[in-house]
Amino acid sequence: MKKEPIIHVKNVSKSYPIAGKEFMALKQIDLSLNEGEFAGIVGPSGSGKTTLLNIIGSLDKPTQGDAFVLNKDIKALSHNEAASLRNYHIGFIFQVFNLLPVYTVFENVEFALLLQNNSAKERREAVMRALNWVGLTDHADKRPDKLSGGESQRVAIARAMVKAPKIVLADEPTANLDSENAHEILKTMKKLNQELGTTFLFSTHDEKVMGYLDRIIHLRDGKIEKDEKNKL
Amino acid sequence: MIKFIIRGILRDKSKSIIPIAVISVGVMVTVMMSGFLEGVFSDVINQNAKLDTGHVKIMTKPYAENKEQLPNDLALLGINELIDSLNLNYPDLIWTPRIKFGGIMDVPDASGNTKLQGPGIGLAISILSEESGELQRLQLNKSLKKGRLPKRSGEIILSDNYATKLNISPGEKITFFGSTMEGSMVFQSYEMTGTVEFGSPLMDKGTFIIDIRDAQNMLDMENGTGELLGYFKDDKYDDQKALVIAENFNAKFQESKDEYAPVMFTLKDQNGLRESLDMGDAFSGIFIFIFILAMSLVLWNTGLIGGLRRYNEFGIRLALGESKNNVFKLLLIEASVIGLIGSIIGTSLGLVFCYYLQEVGIDISKDVANSTIIMPSVMRAYVTSDLFYIGFIPGLFSMLFGTALAGRGIYKRETARLFKELEV
Ligand SMILES: Nc1ncnc2c1ncn2[C@@H]1O[C@H](COP(=O)(O)OP(=O)(O)OP(=O)(O)O)[C@@H](O)[C@H]1O
Ligand SMILES: [Mg+2]
């Protein structure tokens, strides 16, 4: 029996009303990801990458078509159900690091766990484990403004990973990093993908990122142009 | 989570300092104004009560109608019997007669010729009887400027200004010229023993005080008085109680054919106090309301600006799986904490200011020197229990209200939009 895909996007379109007209950001997208994939959506600016990730991440709803994530119909989820799905199963990493400046590294990572009813001890263990994955245990008590860009993005990865989600969605995670840090980040994520089996879906137009991907989905003007295995 | 959020606000000074400052100032001004108005109002009440109106006052109907003219020909008679029955019927009150009368004071020189003279208002009170409580009530010991208080019949004290005007010092003789209740001429010599300052410009201008018995004798008012004042024994004016007593008393004389039947007035129903005090109450109510409204608007605005700056944070929290409800709820909790801190600071500052004004006061005697109503010459604030919540509660709620309005934005926006804004 064939395994159910962890992400299943069927005939999804998304339009935005712009100046009275409907602007189609996504046009009839079909896409499936299996558990444990390390895939990327690649395309020029404005091609709809973020829009697609937001729908998969239940931050947004498709105008047409259906998106299933972990067998849940994104369109049918209530706001609270969507929040709960994100809370337990989906980790986000953004282009800008988006750490909360008033909190320490430890607290930023812990924040993701506060909505789940874990004890302080469990949280502490999980946070330190996640910081260990990204090699930042020494920086736990620092504030984000004391960190380099690469370190900040690693905190964001730890924050996404700390709840051991099934899926991590990373929207141009290397766009603000120099090449050395970008490679560092990608290696970290690839390692987590292999060790924990977490499914990763990137959006990027960064050549360096493409080098690490197992699968590249080319997006242009809201349409999938090409979906290929990456020969590493 | 709540602890976490609160830790966040405490660390981020910029997020909390402006609203806290706004609330503090708003609450402080509210507390200050309330304490000040409270102080002035209760001083006005107290001073009227002790110098003029009593907590309730009994006069004859025609006397009451012409009381500005001090018409002692219309005086109450048979007051000993009246007081006995009042004591029986209204045990909460203590009764004391006062006679006000006009006349001319004449200061003779060594040979008995007029040195200086001037008109004055006489106030006859039970100064020689201990149980009347008039000495304490009028705080004559405290207001004594020169000399001593009368100890026996035939002694007189003057308001300090009046004594200065007449150039008379304690120990000297002074003669009163006036008319009796019946209208015959009378003059009587007194020994001046001291001067007092009432703290009310109207009274300080030209008042002299003699004992009620001297006045009754001199003015042919045996067992009579112009006014019979009642004071609550606990010394606190209770308008509700006073109204009931007055109504009860007046009902008994409603049908009376006697044109000199007594009639009782409450403190507030004299000197137009009810109108002005009610107006003052209304004004302070309106003032506080407007203040809260303005404070809410300012806080709404700071809340909005703060909220916009925080869309980034809200976006992250939503992405991490927090529900909008939860973000909103925590925003309100934050607002409560900030409102609480601001209200505590504001209330404390306001109380300190009121305490200062209570102890020191603002001297307005120059401005009201020609006042024709009885009002204190030093305006003071009073620290009352009201002040602890009068600013506090509005401070807290305006912050909550402002934030709630601002926070609705979280709901209005689509989740993804909340996010878009953090990509730029
Ligand atoms: N909320 C929105 N309202 C209107 N138009 C939108 C909205 N979100 C996205 N768009 C439009 O949809 C198109 C796709 O946007 P999207 O952000 O998905 O592109 P992208 O591939 O992520 O681009 P980039 O590489 O610049 O991040 C763009 O033309 C954008 O202007
Ligand atoms: Mg994008």
Image (cartoon, rainbow, N blue to C red):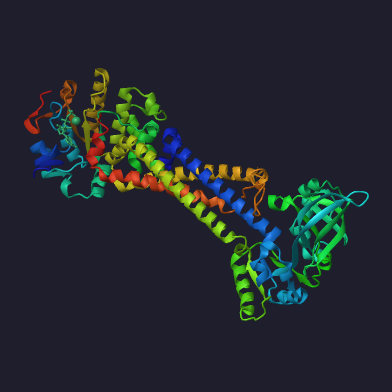
Horizontal side of A60 relative to B51 (left or right) equals: left
Percent coordinates x, y for residue B401 in the rendering: 39, 48
Question: For the view shown, which residue lies furthest in the right direction?
Answer: B111
Q: Is residue B252 visible?
A: yes
Horizontal side of B121 relative to A176 (left or right) equals: right
Q: Is residue B322 visible?
A: no
The answer to which image quadrant residue A139 occupies is: top left
Q: Is residue A225 above or below residue B208?
A: above
Q: Residue at x 82, y 64 (%)?
A: B185
In the rendered image, the quadrant that contains the N terminus of chain A is top left
> Closest to the observer: B385 or A212?
B385
Total tally of numbered discs in the picture: 0
Horizontal side of A153 relative to A122 (left or right) equals: left
> Closest to the observer: B240 or A197?
B240
Percent coordinates x, y for residue B326 in the rendering: 33, 47
Quadrant assignment for ligand 1:
top left
